[in-house]
Structure formats: structure tokens, C-alpha cells
């Protein structure tokens, strides 16, 4: 059975109180009226009896031999005139000499007459005899100073008459009106209590309080309640731990929101009742609590911890809110320090993965370079490239400079381009040494050429060179037909065929040269292709690490152009993009007149992951597919 709510219990208690009070008042009024009536009747009976006992006729009767003969008519006459229930004359032994019922004359009076025999008059309320409940007066009759008889006079008293005279109906009507008004007041009170107690009884509220209090102090998140006046109203154990506040003990008294001063002994109530502005908190977190605005997953640093803070305002229109109720904010605190540490470990792991992907981009490029150098007879340069890869060389340029290395890289890339139906032409014009390591040029050239080949492939492959045929061969064949059929017609056909061939021609041009500048010489590397070009929306993103427009399912994408850009920047250079018949990437790197650490050691550059970029590249060689997923298509 559902326990009664507080409102119902108050209403039933009030109803019982009114009923009990009405009964008590009614009984008190009845008893008071009854006693009053009895006293009045007793006084009247005593006065009547005194008048009768002094009558000459009574004295004469008691002096005669037959008192009954005289007293019986007299008593009946007095009973009628004085509205008496009885007027009985007796001798000193209590034998009735008169009675309203003549058959009872001579019988013994059952009441008390001894005080009257002794000469004392008295009154009483008695129900003895046939008269029933009555107010009586008993007086002695004296003749010559001697008690010769007893007179008892009585008047019947009806309790119904007393009840009627007590105004009981008026009392009951008043109680009914009071009950109606109290019921209305109880109804209004019940509605108020139902709203603020949610219709729960004391047992339910006690159970809910114990449950909520237990949950509040055992949750893993800190909870703080701030009043609208900026005072701390409540907080749990976790909040005390995170904010270094005293823990509130269960025996401590609750907070009185009406108090304006706080005991200086903070351990008595913890931080409850203190103004937020007076508590030692980080300024940013204190400002949030004082401002009272809603906050969602905001991070704050407090006491060596990273706290995720949520703050919400108590809704005044929420269920159970009443006029005058204290409002404020509820703040939850979550310790994200451990999560932040795990996030850092995850970021380190991700950085290591990115470094391994960068190595895969560089390794194949170095192998192709070594192979091309060996095929070209540049054994020393090939040895130098291998030595750089294993860290057994000071990475200085040989007597022939880096031109053979670049030639080897581009020769290998040209072979790959022919397999994909692309013509790759390159030109290297260097007037002196670049003072740059060969690994730098392998990284830049290899990734830019790979990116260009992927861009051209994105508009559709036309097959291998042997199946498609050379554009020059088509033009030559058409020219021969022109000589036989007519110079003018043949020339026109050759021109048309050349236009068609031009539309199908897939090419890449690479130019490497150095040029003087105001602050020294610059190495310029230009790579142009016949691809579709860079979409305007992607120009700002193609150099981001991991960004790729190719198949997302392929791994290792999005590192080629990032490697080119980061390498050029760490050497003080730039990378620019231009749109022509395709795309033109231009890398410009300053070349100092003397050997710089850039040529002898790899400058330390920290990547976005926090890993040293040279540590990421030192163990890797240039990859054949550096922009395999790099950067964009075109």
C-alpha cells in the first residue's frame, strides 16, 4: 500500500482534532449547564422548603394526632402551585406522612435524612425514589424548638432539557463551519506540499534523502551547488577532494540559507556558506562560478589537475520550484588528468606511426636513386647515398656535386613515367656546389615527381607508351602523307593530327638550376605537369600532413607534399603553386656560399606531433610513392 503523503496526514490529523475538540467543548458546555441548573434548582427547592416548614398549617398538623389528614392536601396544593415533583412530609424516622401517590403514604423514605434529624438543612441531586433524577432540599420541622418531622421538596431535572439549554446545535454548526474552512485550508496546503514534496510521504522522503545523500558522496564526479548569492550550499566528497575543501561530515548541521555570517571555524560546516569570492580557487574557475553562466565540458587547471567543468542554472520553473525557494547553479567536476595522460600517450603513438609512414615514402626513392647511380657509373655517389641512409657519412657533396644524384633520381623517375605512359623531361643546370645533402634533393624531387604522375593518372590513363604510340611518330607519318598527296592538304592533316596528339600528350617537365640573389644563391626546382590542376578549395590544404584526395582506404597517404614543404621551410625556403597547362610547383632554397650545418647534419625540426622531424626522417629513405595519397589529385 502506498504510504500517505504529508498533506493527507495533516488533513486527517486536522479533521480528528476538530472532531475531538468539538466533542470536548460540547461535553464541557453540557456539564457546565447541568451543574448550573442543578444549583439553581437546589436553591429554589431549599427556599421553597423553608417557606413551607414555617407555615402555621404545618405546625398545627405536626401537633395533631393525624398529621396526614392536614398535610396531604397541603402538599398537593403546594406541588401544583410551585411546580414541584414532590413535597413529602416525614416523621423523624423517615416514614412518609404525605406523598404525591397516596398509596405510598406510610412507606419509608430511601434517601438520607439524618442531617435534617440533627437539625441541619441540606440539598442534593439524587435519583432515588420514584421521582427519578431530581434536585432536592431536605429541611427539619421544628415545634417549640424541637425537631418533630422532616420535609423534602424536589424538582425533576431532565438531561435532555439541560442538553437543549447548552446550545449544542450552535456548537455543532460552528464546528461544521470551522471544519469546512479548515478543509479548504488543508486542501490548499496539500497542493503546496504535494508540489514541494512530489506527493511523497515522510518515509519515502527519508529513503530518497538517504539514497541521494549516499549517491552524492560516492559518485566519481564532484558536485557543487552555488546559491544565487554566490555562496556554497552543498558539495560532495569528490568535489572536496578535487578543490581541496574540507569534507562535510554526516553529523554536521545543514546550511541555513538565511544566515548572513559564517562561523570562522570552517571545519564545522566545511566550505558550506562561504562566498565563492572568498575561497581559494583558480581565478578562471572562480569567475565561472560567480558569473553563473551555463558551461559545457570546459577545461580548467586547479591544484595540479585538469578539470572538465559543466555548470547549469537551476530552472525556476522546474518541478517543485516554489516562490521564495533558493535558486542557483549546479556544477559538476570531472578529473581529466588521467585521460589527458592517456591522450598524450596516444598522440605519441600516432606520431611514431606517422614517422614510420614517412620512412616508407623515402626508402624506395633512395633505392631507385642508388640503382640509377650505379647504372650511370657514379659509384661514389651511390656509396654516399647509402652512407647517408645508415648514418656513416658526413653527407658532404663529392667532387662532382649533387648533380649526379639528381640525375639518377630523375632517370629512375623517367623510367617509371614511361611505364605509365608519361613523358618526363628534365634539365639540371648548376654552376657550383649546393652545400645541401643529397637526401634533401631526393626528398624534394622524388615526392614532387610522384605527385605529378599521380595527378596525370587522375584524368585517365591512355595505356603504355608502346600501345599508345608516340605523338612524334604520328606527326612524322602524317607529314609523309602530305608529301605524297599534296603539300597543303598534308600539312593541314599534320596540323590536325598534332592537335589531337597534343590533347593526348601526358608529360612532366623538371628544371633544376641555381641563380644569384641579393643574399646569396638560390636553388630552384620546378616541376610542371599536364594534370588537371589544383582545385582552388584545396590549395590551402594540400601541404597538410595526412591530407589526401585519393582512396581513404589506402594507408600511407598524405605525406609527400608535406615532406616537400617541411623540408623546404626548415632550410629557409618556400614552395609555391602556379596554374598553367597543368600545375607548376616551384621550390626555392637558399644556398649559402660556405658549407652550413644543413649540409653536414640534419637540422632538428619538430613536427606537429611533437616528434623531431629529423628523427622521423633520419632512419628513413625517400619513398617512391611519397605523394601516394598525398596531397591532392593534380
Image: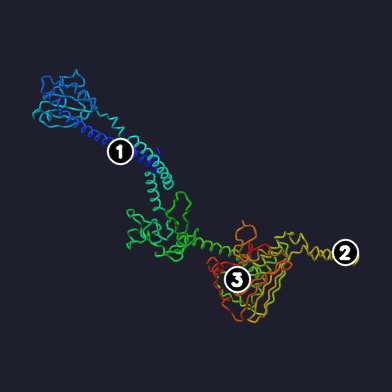
Front residue of this view, candidates 179 and 140: 140
Residue depicted at 67% across the width and 62% down the height: 633
- Quadrant housing residue 357: bottom right
In the displayed image of the protein, which residue is found farthest to the front?
A: 56
- The x and y percentages for residue 476 are 83, 66
Front residue of this view, candidates 373 and 29: 29
Q: Quadrant of the N terminus?
A: top left
Q: Any mark on residue 481, and which?
A: 2
Q: Any mark on residue 567, and which?
A: 3
Task: Indicate whether 165 appears above or below 108.
Answer: below
| Distance of label 1 from label 3 (alpha carbons) | 105 Å
Reading the image, the residue beneath label 1 is 25
Residue 58 in the figure: left or right of residue 182: left
Front residue of this view, candidates 439 and 252: 252
Task: Indicate whether 165 appears above or below 237.
Answer: above
Q: Residues within 10 Å of mark 2 (few under 14, many from 20)?
A: some
As helix, strand or loop, the secondary structure at mark 1 comes to helix
Please tell me whether mark 1 or mark 2 is closer to you in this view.
Answer: 1
Residue 542 in the figure: left or right of residue 119: right
Q: Residues within 10 Å of mark 1 (few under 14, many from 20)?
A: some
| Distance of label 2 from label 3 (alpha carbons) | 52 Å
Amino acid at each position: 500500500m502506498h504510504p500517505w503523503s504529508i498533506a493527507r496526514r495533516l488533513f486527517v490529523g486536522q479533521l480528528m482534532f476538530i472532531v475531538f475538540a468539538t466533542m470536548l467543548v460540547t461535553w464541557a458546555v453540557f456539564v457546565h449547564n447541568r451543574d448550573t441548573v442543578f444549583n439553581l434548582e437546589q436553591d429554589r427547592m431549599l427556599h421553597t422548603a423553608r417557606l413551607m416548614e414555617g407555615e402555621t398549617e404545618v405546625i398545627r398538623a405536626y401537633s395533631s394526632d393525624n398529621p396526614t389528614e392536614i398535610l396531604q392536601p397541603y402538599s398537593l396544593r403546594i406541588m401544583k402551585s410551585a411546580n414541584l415533583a414532590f413535597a413529602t412530609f416525614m416523621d423523624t424516622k423517615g416514614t412518609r406522612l404525605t406523598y404525591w401517590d397516596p398509596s405510598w403514604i406510610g412507606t419509608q423514605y430511601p434517601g438520607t435524612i439524618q442531617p435534617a434529624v440533627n437539625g441541619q438543612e441540606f440539598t442534593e441531586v439524587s435519583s432515588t425514589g420514584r421521582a427519578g433524577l431530581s434536585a432536592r432540599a431536605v429541611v427539619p420541622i421544628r415545634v417549640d424548638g424541637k425537631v418533630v418531622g422532616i420535609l423534602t421538596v424536589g424538582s425533576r431535572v431532565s438531561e435532555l432539557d439541560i442538553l437543549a439549554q447548552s446550545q449544542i446545535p450552535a456548537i455543532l454548526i460552528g464546528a461544521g463551519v470551522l471544519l469546512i474552512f479548515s478543509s479548504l485550508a488543508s486542501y490548499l496546503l496539500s497542493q503546496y506540499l504535494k508540489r514541494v514534496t512530489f506527493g511523497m510521504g515522510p518515509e519515502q522522503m527519508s529513503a530518497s534523502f538517504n539514497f541521494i545523500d549516499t549517491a552524492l558522496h560516492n559518485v566519481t564526479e564532484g558536485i557543487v551547488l552555488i546559491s544565487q548569492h554566490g555562496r556554497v550550499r552543498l558539495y560532495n566528497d569528490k568535489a572536496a577532494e578535487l578543490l581541496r575543501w574540507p569534507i562535510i561530515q554526516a553529523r554536521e548541521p545543514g546550511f541555513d540559507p538565511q544566515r548572513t555570517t559564517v562561523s570562522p571555524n570552517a571545519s564545522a560546516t566545511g566550505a558550506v556558506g562561504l562566498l565563492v569570492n572568498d575561497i581559494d580557487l583558480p581565478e578562471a574557475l572562480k569567475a565561472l562560478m560567480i558569473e553563473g553562466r551555463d558551461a559545457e565540458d570546459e577545461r580548467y587547471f586547479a591544484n595540479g589537475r585538469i578539470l572538465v567543468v559543466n555548470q547549469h542554472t537551476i530552472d525556476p520553473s522546474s518541478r517543485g520550484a516554489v516562490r521564495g525557494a533558493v535558486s542557483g547553479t549546479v556544477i559538476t567536476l570531472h578529473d581529466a588528468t588521467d585521460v589527458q595522460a592517456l591522450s598524450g600517450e596516444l598522440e605519441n603513438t600516432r606520431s611514431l606511426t606517422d614517422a614510420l609512414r614517412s620512412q616508407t615514402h623515402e626508402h624506395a626513392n633512395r633505392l631507385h636513386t642508388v640503382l640509377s647511380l650505379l647504372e650511370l657509373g657514379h659509384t661514389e655517389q651511390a656509396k654516399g647515398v647509402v652512407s647517408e641512409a645508415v648514418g656513416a657519412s658526413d653527407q658532404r657533396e663529392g667532387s662532382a656535386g649533387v648533380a649526379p644524384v639528381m640525375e639518377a633520381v630523375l632517370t629512375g623517375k623517367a623510367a617509371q613515367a614511361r611505364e605509365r605512359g608519361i613523358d618526363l623531361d628534365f634539365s639540371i643546370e648548376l654552376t657550383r656546389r649546393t652545400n645541401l645533402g643529397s637526401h634533401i634533393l631526393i626528398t624534394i624531387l622524388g615526392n614532387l615527381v610522384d605527385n605529378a604522375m599521380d595527378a596525370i593518372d587522375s584524368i585517365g590513363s591512355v595505356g603504355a607508351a608502346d600501345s599508345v604510340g608516340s605523338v612524334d611518330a604520328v606527326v612524322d607519318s602524317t607529314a609523309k602523307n602530305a608529301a605524297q598527296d599534296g603539300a597543303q592538304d598534308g600539312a593541314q592533316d599534320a596540323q590536325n593530327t598534332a592537335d589531337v596528339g597534343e590533347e593526348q600528350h601526358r608529360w612532366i617537365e623538371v628544371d633544376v638550376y641555381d641563380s644569384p640573389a641579393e643574399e646569396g644563391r638560390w636553388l630552384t626546382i620546378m616541376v610542371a605537369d599536364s594534370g588537371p590542376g589544383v582545385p582552388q578549395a584545396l590549395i590551402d590544404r594540400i601541404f597538410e600532413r595526412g591530407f589526401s584526395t585519393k582512396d581513404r582506404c589506402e594507408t600511407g597517404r598524405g605525406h609527400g607534399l608535406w615532406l616537400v614543404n617541411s623540408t623546404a621551410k626548415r632550410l629557409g625556403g618556400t614552395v609555391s603553386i602556379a596554374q598553367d597547362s597543368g600545375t607548376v610547383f616551384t621550390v626555392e632554397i637558399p644556398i649559402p656560399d660556405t658549407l652550413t650545418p644543413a649540409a653536414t647534419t640534419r637540422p632538428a625540426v619538430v613536427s606537429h606531433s611533437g616528434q623531431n622531424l629529423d628523427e622521423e626522417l633520419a632512419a628513413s629513405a625517400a619513398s617512391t610513392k611519397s605523394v601516394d595519397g598525398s596531397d591532392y589529385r593534380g
